Amino acid sequence: MDPKGVALVTGAASGIGKAIALRLASDGFDIALNDLESSKGRLEILTQEITQKGRRTSIVLGDVSQEVDVKRIIDTAVHDLGGLDVTVANAGIVEKPVPFPDTKVEDWDRIFSINSRGVFLCYKYAAQQMIKQGRGGRIIGASSIAGKQGDGLYASYCSSKFAVRGLTQSAAKDLGPHKITVNAYAPGYINTPMLNSIGDNIGDWETFKQNRVGITPMGRLGEDNDVASIVSYLASKESHFITGQSISVNGGIFFD
């Protein structure tokens, strides 16, 4: 079966990124997989899963906070798989909770380098490639529930995710004439390794988990496939009139 196109997913080795890569492969896309060098083994296992779905893959290691890496990631994906139709700028990190006045500049810069600059670089070079191809495309980024409501203990993380929303809206306006849509997903509390790390930092995972379940009207944590399903739609041809949006996937914790 001919592919629907080529999709690049950053931060694909685990959690939401892995679920997105598998879902887009099931949808019919060939997948370029990106993560850090330390995640190579997990990407190789993921490649086997995607190959079993009848799709081609390319592993492109690199750090999305580094411009030279992002340019290489895009170029390699295009070289290996023949083009670029969907880019999912999923890679991100979270900091340990700290009161806002105690936030360190180096921690702020580290969070922004990946969560904000990394998304910007992926958007930028994906857009250049898609414009050159002349067939439109889908650019999708990772915001968060923390990018819609601030939290004093996670000032840098929240701010970096708010930045993704502004970037998404700005890029959507500029790229619309090229038939490129730009959207973001804003997960709530999703049962992933990142959420587990937050619970571990607080020191009591079960209490943390139950508190989050308690404030979610759906009565449970989300799963990574809950987010992947939204990305699947945003990557589809049917979503052609949706752009500049940051779509909440939060079980009803709040309403936009």
Image: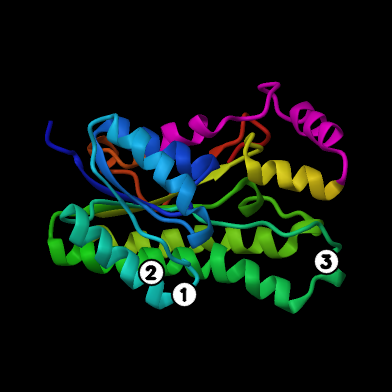
Q: Which badge, 1 or 3, is on the more N-terminal residue? A: 1
Main secondary structure of the magenta stretch: helix
Q: How crowded is mark 1: few (under 14 residues within 10 Å), some or many (20 or more)?
A: some
x and y percent of residue 113 in the render? 56, 71
Q: Name the residue under label 3.
A: 100
User: Relative to 70, is 187 above or below?
Assistant: above
Distance between mark 2 and mark 1 Cα atoms:
6 Å
Q: How crowded is mark 3: few (under 14 residues within 10 Å), some or many (20 or more)?
A: few
Who's the residue at 49% across and 36% down the image?
227
Mark seen at residue 55: none
Q: Is mark 1 on a helix, strand or loop?
A: loop
Q: Which badge, 3 or 2, is on the more N-terminal residue? A: 2
Please say whether residue 153 is one of the residues in the magenta stretch.
no
Q: What element carries label 2?
A: helix
Mark seen at residue 66: 1
Q: Tell me the amino acid under the disc marked 1.
A: Gln
Q: Tell me the amino acid under the disc marked 2.
A: Val
Across the whole image, how many numbered discs are drawn on residues?
Answer: 3
Cβ–Cβ under 8 Å for marks 2 and 1? yes
User: Relative to 210, is 122 above or below?
Assistant: below
Residue 105 horizontal side relative to residue 224, left or right = right
Q: Tell me the amino acid under the disc marked 3.
A: Phe
Q: Is residue 178 visible?
A: no
Question: Which residue range is magenta in the image?
Answer: 203-232
Q: Which of 248 and 7 is in front in this view?
A: 7
Distance between mark 3 and mark 2 Cα atoms:
31 Å
Distance between mark 1 and mark 3 Cα atoms:
27 Å
Residue 22 horizontal side relative to residue 105, left or right = left
Q: Name the residue under label 2.
A: 70
**Within the image, what quadrant is residue 191 found in?**
top right
Who's the residue at 86% across and 71% down the image?
101
